[in-house]
Amino acid sequence: MKKGDHLFLVDGSGYIFRAYHALPPLNRKSDGLPTSAVLGFCNMVWKLMQDARNTSVGIAPTHFAVIFDYSSKTFRSDLYPEYKANRSAPPEDLIPQFGLIRQATVAFNLPCIEMEGFEADDIIATYCRLAREVGADTTIVSSDKDLMQLVGPAVRMYDPMKDRRISIPEVIEKWGVPPEKMIDLQALTGDSVDNVPGVPGIGPKTAAQLLEQFGDLDGLLARASEIKQEKRRETIIANADKARISRELVTLKNDVPLKEGLDDLVLHEPDGPKLIGFLKTMEFTTLTRRVAEATATEIGDVQASAVTVERADTAHGPDVGAGAPPRQPAPQSNDAAKPAQAVRGEDVPPQGDTPSLLSALRLEQASARKIDPSAYAPIRDAAALKAWVAEARDAGILAFDAETTSSDPMQADLIGLSMAIAPGRAVYLPLAHRNGNGDLLGGGLLENQIPVREALALLKPLLEDRSVLKIVQDMKYDIVVMSRHGIEVAPFDDTMLISYVLDAGTSGGHDLASLSEKWLGHAPAAKKELAGSGKNAIGFDQVDIERATAYAGEQADLALRLWQVLKPRLPAKGLVSVYERLERPLVPVLARMEQRGISVDRQILSRLSGELAQGAARVEEEIYGIVGERINIGSPKQLGDILFGKMGLPGGSKTKTGQWSTSAQLLEDLAAEGHELPRKIVDWRQLTKLKSTYTDALPGFINPGTNRVHTSYALAATTTGRLSSSDPNLQNIPVRTAEGRKIRTAFIADKGHKLVSADYSQIELRVLAHVAEIPQLKQAFADGADIHAITASEMFNVPVEGMPSEVRRRAKAINFGIIYGISAFGLANQLSIPREEAGAYIKRYFERFPGIRDYIEETKAYARENGFVETIFGRRIHYPEIRSSNPSVRAFNERASINARLQGTAADIIRRAMVHMEEALEKAKLSARMLLQVHDELIFETVEAEVEATIPVVRKVMENAPMPAVSMSVPLHVDARAADNWDEAH
DNA sequence: ACAGAAGCTTA
DNA sequence: GTAAGCTTCTGTT
């Protein structure tokens, strides 16, 4: 190696884990061998090696090595036994890929370096030093912060998954310190993943600031007494030794005795046939073809190579969608090592012929095509728009995204539309961009924008064309906006909902940015980069058209690419009917509900607000009188100090930040002991809560145009399949107390109309009786009996007739406990009884209802085996942490998975009811309109004369909602009532 | 201006 | 013990 050469060092071990978690699972078609990390690795290495031929574009390596960890035991474990001690075993389907990636390295003709007793990072540090000494440059292919200490003028890092270079400025930007201070920074912050202790309470921000002030760690420890903040000063002095040992742990060794010298790392041309043999064996069709083209090799001439697999486990869940009977068998798991299959003799076809192959192929294609926001063009005149419409018709597919001035679709003004018909082929149609000095009459409109009416008239036939599939991320928003302009968009696919059906419960959200990062490895531009945030934010109409084009074009382009990647995964995972029956058809239904809104009486709320203010003020004075000073009652901190410090009340538990707990439960207990202050505080809280959250906030949500309140329902926000409601949340309007219920009297029907409320009775317990097949519960529901009383009677051998209410109350708590994934701890809390007693109740309950214990155990086993549970309609809810070695994390995931099957099935049932409701009402010639959903309740508005006819129709749709997909063995029961306001209807 | 904790509302 | 969203306070940016 000589001056000017360029050494590439790939952190192989780091890459394996990162690729495994970042890339979607991929299994070899022929035998299910997991290969996603291998494919990611091969794509990355191939790309880097291609850059070597093209010096004008990329960085050209002359030397190249892939470095691996040898084993987890290194000199650091001797230094500090806890180092990396809390590492859990790698996931099952990753294990076989370690060996495969080493074999891939060999297939690429690259040196594969590892050394007993040292981590890959130490080897990398040593090569860095050697290269620097001969004047060569080094690029470390990794984004691990542990390697950032090596960055310098001749050493940089490259993150292959984000296509980002990390040199000195990037390190400073990210960590606030230059690379040479990274060691000291890590010594202070520690690393929970590797069990490096650091100084507790010191994070990167604080550490950077301290290093700035004191120069380095030694300076800081020597002059720690000068630190102003008392707590910080004490912890640093107390933990100085931990900081020093942490520094030793994070300092990389750059004098590892290496077997291969720099000159052994010279980059060789890949050996076409050898590499292709490997790739073919892995069944990476696209990459195989690409390599064959680049090396001028005939694929057909190459035999698949012999590849040894350490262990090839596969675990496929049953691929059945809605309409399937309830089931819960554990899928077969093959623990025996399978020999790698050779691929077919003839060439592998470039197009996939099965769902899973197609989805793998699409992913490979998506990661191969570059995203370039500067390539999108604006459409400035009608002729160009017409040409685009024609092109989109031919394509049969159109991704789009509406750009507006508000996140509330009922208030949003349409500013522009971006559209895409193929990856990279996107345009932006500006409609209402303005310069700063506009007036109310529409002045300030920028030139060369097609008038909104004209543009929408041209687009309407396309957006409503049954033969053109529209693709949108979060379609409900766009349906509401476009519908306000008289356009009923159809048919459509929604990438957010596809992701939700596929991956509910896995880490990461279903918003466009998360999906793009996850599937395309690309972080899209954020809106706040264009429009700012907070009070300095400008409307999208103020964004200049060039920047808007790049931003909006990318949104449409990404939606299209994501659709190409995600849609084929639905059939591959057997989730097509969940998407098509439970998700997609609900979108226009919810859009209409949101658009209708509900009437809220301002006067009632205003009067209530006054009453609450008076009540709160009175209680406030009483509290001040007792306390003797005017504290802020709303501050739990001040309140705790007063109650348990000054007043000397017996304090209960502390919160995790060390504050006294002032929870309602605790204050109630104190009140029961005869203290008057806690009672008053609970009262004050109730009054101020009702006032601030409801009576004062709701009027602000009344839309000035419609005079109604339009909530927003999120379809993909919960893990279980429930909806959520926000802005305002109309799913948590008070109902338990008489005071709170007054809020509901403000939700009213229009003149001449009534509100109809229809709610499922005990739906989750009925689902439990059905899925767990409990004869006594089924019978009780069939008889229309009191389910909690029957439970109590079974458990305590007391007749239902004349049963004390306390006995029934306990049974009821247990029934609810089951739905929540019961624990003795939780039940004890709920009933205020000792944990042993709660445990005895549970034991007794399981003796009487052994089917429920079986159901719980079965669900836990299934979730553990598969990483997800399913509702009876086939919706999947993932629990990736259910195999955690942390017992409390594991227990939490077990409870959640038990609950998810029940809550999720109930959510699916009401979704089905909502999907079928409009057609049923129309068929019965009824004008009732669905307005709200509150998990097990639907609220309608209908003309008075139709109330009697509407209720039976609504009831029937709701009670028969599972049919015909599932025939439940327990009847569903719906209570329905009509009144002038929500309180009386409920 | 934002983020997290604490607390409270619902099913 | 499950699932959510909103307000206030508090400390950091």
Image (cartoon, coloured by chain):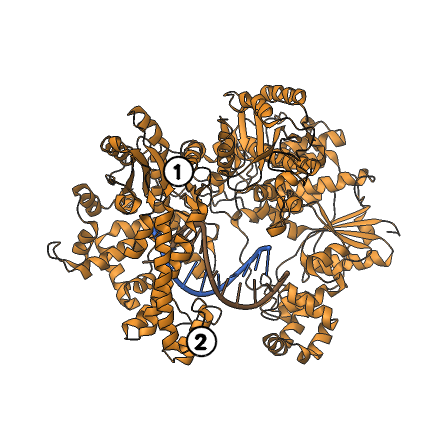
Chain colours: A orange, B blue, C brown
Instruction: Identify which residue, A706 or A879, lies in the foreground.
Output: A706
Instruction: Identify which residue, A983 or A732, lies in the foreground.
Output: A983
Q: Secondary structure at mark 1?
A: loop
Is the Cβ of the residue at disc 1 closer than 8 Å to that at disc 2?
no
Q: Secondary structure at mark 2?
A: helix
**Residue, x 42% and y 80% (percent of image)?**
A646
What chain is tagged by disc 1? A
The tag earlier along the polypeptide, 1 or 2, is: 2
> Can you identify the residue that label 1 sits on?
A874
Q: Quadrant of residue A972?
A: top left
Q: Residue A850 in the image: state x and y as whole percent.
A: 25, 52
Q: Is residue A848 left or right of residue A128?
A: left
Q: Residue A171 in the image: state x and y as whole percent.
A: 72, 57
Mark 2: amino acid: Asp
Mark 1: amino acid: Gly
> Can you identify the residue that label 2 sits on?
A641
Instruction: Identify which residue, A358 or A115, lies in the foreground.
Output: A358
Q: Quadrant of the C terminus of chain A?
A: top left
